Amino acid sequence: FEDAGWSLVTVELGRGAALPDNLDDFAAVVVLGGPMNVYQDEAYPFLRDEDRFIREVLTEETPFLGICLGAQLLAKACNAPVMKAAQKEVGWYTVDLTQKGRQDRLFRQLKGPLTVFQWHEDTFGVPDGGTLLVTSDVVPNQAFRIGSCAYGLQFHVEASLDMVDA
């Protein structure tokens, strides 16, 4: 993002940082992963604030990208279920674009199947009105879009080989 000239604001809720009061100064929101699960809001109370914030992002139609836990939080904010997956995925896995995924502006430049890094034990239902974009045999719901500008990706597009090795 910085290489593209964007200025970034990083908010680490797990370290006590607060979410912004409004979205006036933000062109987009990216929510990354974490070791917790979306339904652990008793142990991680900031998840409640994050849920409210994501609902505001959706209402304002601010572009949103949720990765792993971020995708699960997006699904939850859209009233879709989030639950344990039939199998944990940790490592490199193959996923496939759906027909709608091959046409979607986020993925249409890519050829499938894709090899992606996974590190999760939960999965999500695709929200009502959402579009499944990426699937796999192990965990069928891998990526979805809700509305025109909110995306949830179960896999980690931000992970490089060097990051994973470290």
Image (cartoon, grey):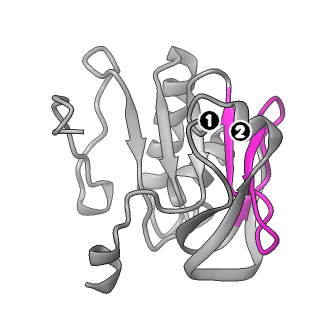
**Disc 2 element:** helix
Left or right, 154 with respect to 130, comes to: left
> Which residue is denoted by mark 1 in the rendering?
108
* Whether label 1 touches label 2, CB < 8 Å: yes
- The relative height of residue 34 versus residue 109 in the rendered view (above or below) is below
Among all residues in the image, which is located at the extreme front?
A: 111
Left or right, 115 with respect to 53, comes to: right
> Which residue is denoted by mark 2 in the rendering?
102
Residue at the image position 48 percent from the left and 53 percent from the top: 47
Q: Nearer the viewer, residue 66 or 165?
A: 165
Residue 124 placement (x, y as % from top left):
73, 57
Q: Number of callouts in the render?
A: 2
Q: Nearer the viewer, residue 10 or 151?
A: 151
As for residue 110 lying within the magenta part, the answer is no
Residue 125 placement (x, y as % from top left):
79, 52
Left or right, 65 with respect to 132, comes to: left
